[in-house]
């Protein structure tokens, strides 16, 4: 007999036994009285002798494990005080999982044999063993309550009579069986999207069908489209949504203007990235007679066009966010709105929702006004242009501003042009106020994350031709501070009202002590430390850490590790404040073109300004949870697209030696991040031929048993590309050696 077939039969029999054990517990759980083995068999729909014998054997094993008890001769029920919980299954790449239960302080370990057809992310019922196994809570999954994901991306392998899809995710523990009549147009070896249709209790794998073919693995279009599909994210708008959006009346009407504050005669402009197409925020500026400044933050009034209950609103809610991949944007709203009607383009009248502040010279808010407006942008600037204006007058001893010429190499107008004095004064004055606002935040305990972003230069075929870093300068921080101020003041305005009103908050909890301790352990290798005695000392020392690593080889590593030590920000109706920003109240109000929570904030604020009653908190909490989840999926997709482009870029750099910093050490390899382009890859220990290297978890290092060579977290080393896998989005490196040794040679 074929050995592989024999193993398959054994596996199938074992699966059947485990299935009976789980089914028996389920039957007894749902029965109001004890049952004998014949009654159990009847409820399971089996009447053959072999199955009844198997049921009898399974009952005996369950009694031995104390899951079931015999209450009278031949009558069985679930053992008293059994522990059943509901939670989310989090799979590991090693094939086992953990069920996260809110009411438990510890996750429940689930071995692969106890997963009972559950997959990563599923809502499951788990039986918790009475005794701890190896010091850990351990259990078995008794049923899948809700399947988290039914569609998966993978590579199809086609045989004569059937096919299998090998799923791309490392957390998917099984392949998917595809009947030959359900492969569609897929060809062997292509990347596809497959939907699970059923998973019989005795089958090792679920059965599915191919619903989309992406093409051969590695091709650009294949990989980008499959990234979106892997996270269940859309590519295009349904025709009916596009048609609905195109029918919206986007003209500015006199009747609507009369309902709004008219600020068309106030100096207003936008500052955005040079390649931006949607401009959802603008700033206005004027000096008041009392010496204070009137600063307006004007946000596209998306809620004017996107009305609740429409298919446009439903689509926007489902998407919840725009997605920014390396080569494209997948917008939350159709182009007619995102790039046209709602985009605050220069010299076009637009409907906006505004927060207008009176601010003194020390950046204290004296008065504020919220309401709907109609505005006209006088100019559009890129961050580079605004930065040029700021730097020209940065060291000016007086405020004697004058017109300025933007040079051609910076201009987004493809030619040099003149910026009039009033706009120069506005940009420079607002920059000074923004710096003071930032100083106020930092004194209050805000944490300054200015992590360097990696960007790619792409040719017309979306091939990476180079890498550059996006840094946050004064112009970026000018916009950031006034957007933060508007978000904070809107949340504060509603959050302080009594009785309490339902609202959408963006919250950020304090960092976990264990994560901070882990961060401290790692950064101590580089000679840094943090003081976690109080919330204020923690914030202060984290800021000092982030400042101290600026420009150092370890900056990106420590920036990343510090961010990971923080709690995740999320949306909720229950305000706990925002730790990272040091705000007691915070919301998202300033980007409704690309974030659905901002649309909800607009609607609620306007509703309350019109004296509306507080709506259902539960309804909005559900919407907040959905928005947070979709945001996480979008972030994962964006991260995967960057990894893909990094691998694609490095494919053409095989002959170059790169200087990198060791960013991680594991029992199977050393992770190295290249300093010049932030691309990360792995040196496998098995590829280190000069010695046998042993992993030292305590020292974040590997050491050679014979040579005594040590490679430790933070060491600078030279590497070359060994392998660039576009499908797995993974780089393998050859290790050349330590920087010092290599340069001495």
Image (tube, helix red, strand yellow):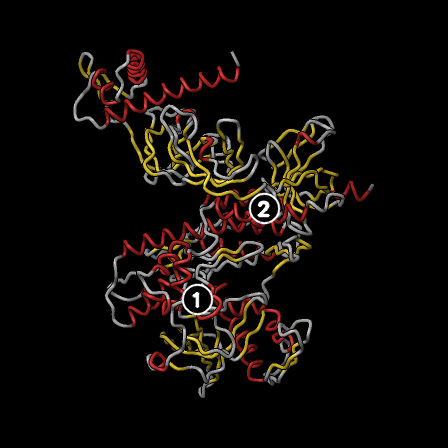
Q: Which residue is mark 1?
A: 590
State the SS at label 1.
loop
Dot 1, crowdedness within 10 Å: few (<14), some or many (≥20)?
Answer: many
Circle 2 sits on which residue?
523
Left or right relative to 84: residue 538? right
Give the numbered dot on residue 455: none
Q: Is residue 373 left or right of residue 66?
A: right
Which one is in front, 74 or 52?
52
Residue extending farthest right: 745
Q: Looking at the image, tell me whether mark 2 or mark 1 is earlier in sequence order.
A: 2
In the image, residue 310 sits, relative to residue 217, either above or below, namely below
User: SS of the residue at dot 2?
Assistant: helix
- Residue 283 in the image: state x and y as whole percent: 48, 75
Q: Nearer the viewer, mark 2 or mark 1?
A: 1
Mark 2 Cα shell of 10 Å, populated few (<14), some (14-19), many (≥20): many
Q: Could one spot residue 596 in this view of the protein?
A: yes
User: Residue 585 appears at what percent x and percent y?
Assistant: 38, 62
Is 607 situated above or below 732? Answer: below
User: Where, by quadrant of the figure, is residue 505 drawn?
Assistant: bottom left
Q: Quadrant of residue 215?
A: top right
């Amino acid at each position: 007999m074929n050995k592989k077939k024999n193993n398959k039969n054994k596996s199938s029999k074992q699966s059947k036994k485990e299935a009976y054990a789980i089914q028996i517990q389920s039957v007894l759980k749902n029965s109001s009285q004890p049952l004998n083995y014949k009654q159990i068999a009847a409820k399971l729909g089996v009447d053959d002798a072999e199955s009844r014998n198997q049921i009898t054997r399974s009952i005996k094993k369950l009694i031995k494990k104390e899951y079931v008890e015999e209450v009278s001769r031949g009558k069985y029920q679930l053992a008293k005080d059994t522990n059943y919980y509901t939670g989310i299954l989090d799979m590991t790449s090693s094939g086992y999982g953990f069920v996260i239960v809110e009411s438990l302080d510890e996750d429940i370990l689930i071995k692969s044999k106890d997963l009972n057809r559950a997959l990563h992310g599923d809502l499951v019922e788990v039986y918790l063993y009475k005794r701890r196994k190896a010091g850990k809570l351990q259990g078995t999954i008794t049923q899948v309550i809700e399947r988290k994901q039914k569609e998966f991306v993978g590579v199809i392998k086609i045989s004569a009579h059937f096919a299998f899809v090998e799923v791309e995710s490392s957390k998917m523990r099984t392949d998917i069986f595809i009947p030959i009549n359900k492969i569609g147009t897929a060809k062997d070896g292509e990347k596809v999207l497959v939907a699970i249709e059923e998973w019989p209790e005795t089958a090792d794998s679920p059965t599915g069908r191919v619903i989309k073919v992406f093409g051969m693995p590695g091709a650009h279009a294949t990989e980008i489209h499959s990234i979106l599909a892997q996270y269940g994210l859309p590519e295009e708008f349904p025709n009916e949504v596009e048609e609905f959006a195109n029918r919206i009346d986007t003209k500015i009407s006199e009747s609507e203007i009369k309902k709004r504050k008219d600020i068309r005669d106030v100096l207003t402009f936008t500052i955005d990235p040079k390649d931006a197409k949607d401009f959802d925020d603008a700033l206005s500026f004027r000096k008041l007679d009392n010496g204070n400044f009137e600063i307006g933050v004007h946000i596209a009034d998306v809620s004017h066009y996107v009305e609740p209950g429409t298919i446009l609103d439903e689509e926007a809610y489902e998407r919840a966010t725009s997605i920014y991949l390396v080569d494209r944007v997948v917008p939350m709203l159709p182009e007619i709105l995102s790039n046209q009607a709602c985009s605050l383009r220069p010299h076009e009248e637009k409907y906006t929702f505004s927060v207008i502040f009176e601010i003194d010279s020390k950046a204290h808010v004296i008065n504020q006004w919220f309401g709907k407006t109609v505005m006209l942008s006088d100019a559009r600037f890129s961050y580079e242009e605004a930065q040029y204006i700021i730097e020209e007058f940065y060291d000016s001893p007086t405020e004697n501003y004058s017109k300025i010429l933007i040079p051609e190499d910076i201009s987004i107008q493809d030619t040099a042009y003149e910026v009039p004095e009033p706009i120069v004064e506005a940009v420079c004055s607002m920059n000074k106020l923004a710096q003071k606002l930032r100083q106020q935040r930092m004194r209050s305990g805000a944490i300054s994350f200015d992590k360097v972003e990696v960007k790619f230069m792409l040719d017309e075929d979306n091939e990476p031709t180079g890498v550059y870093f996006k840094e946050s300068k004064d112009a970026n921080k000018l916009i950031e501070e006034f957007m933060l101020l508007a978000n904070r003041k809107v949340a504060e305005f509603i959050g302080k009202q009594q009785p309490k009103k339902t609202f959408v908050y963006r919250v950020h909890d304090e960092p976990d002590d264990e994560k901070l301790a882990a961060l401290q352990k790692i950064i101590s290798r580089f000679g840094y430390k943090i003081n976690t005695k109080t919330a204020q000392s923690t914030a202060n020392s984290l800021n000092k850490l982030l400042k101290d690593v600026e420009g150092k080889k370890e900056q990106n590593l420590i920036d990343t590790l510090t961010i990971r030590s923080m709690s995740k920000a999320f949306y909720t109706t229950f305000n706990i404040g925002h730790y990272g920003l040091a705000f007691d109240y915070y919301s998202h109000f300033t980007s409704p073109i690309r974030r659905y929570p901002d649309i909800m904030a607009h609607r609620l604020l306007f509703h309350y300004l019109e004296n509306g009653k507080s709506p259902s908190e539960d309804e909005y909490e559900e919407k907040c949870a959905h928005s947070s989840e979709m945001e996480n999926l979008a972030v994962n997709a964006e991260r995967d697209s960057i990894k893909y482009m990094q691998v694609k870029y490095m494919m053409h750099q095989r002959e170059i030696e790169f200087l990198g910093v060791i960013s991680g050490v594991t029992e199977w390899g050393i992770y190295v991040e290249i300093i010049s382009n932030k691309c990360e890859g792995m040196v496998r220990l098995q590829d280190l031929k000069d010695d046998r290297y042993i992993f030292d978890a305590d020292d974040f290092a590997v050491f050679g048993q014979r040579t005594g060579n040590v490679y430790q977290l933070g060491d600078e080393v030279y590497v070359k590309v060994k392998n660039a896998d576009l499908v797995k989005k993974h780089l393998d490196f050859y290790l050349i050696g330590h920087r010092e040794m290599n340069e001495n040679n």
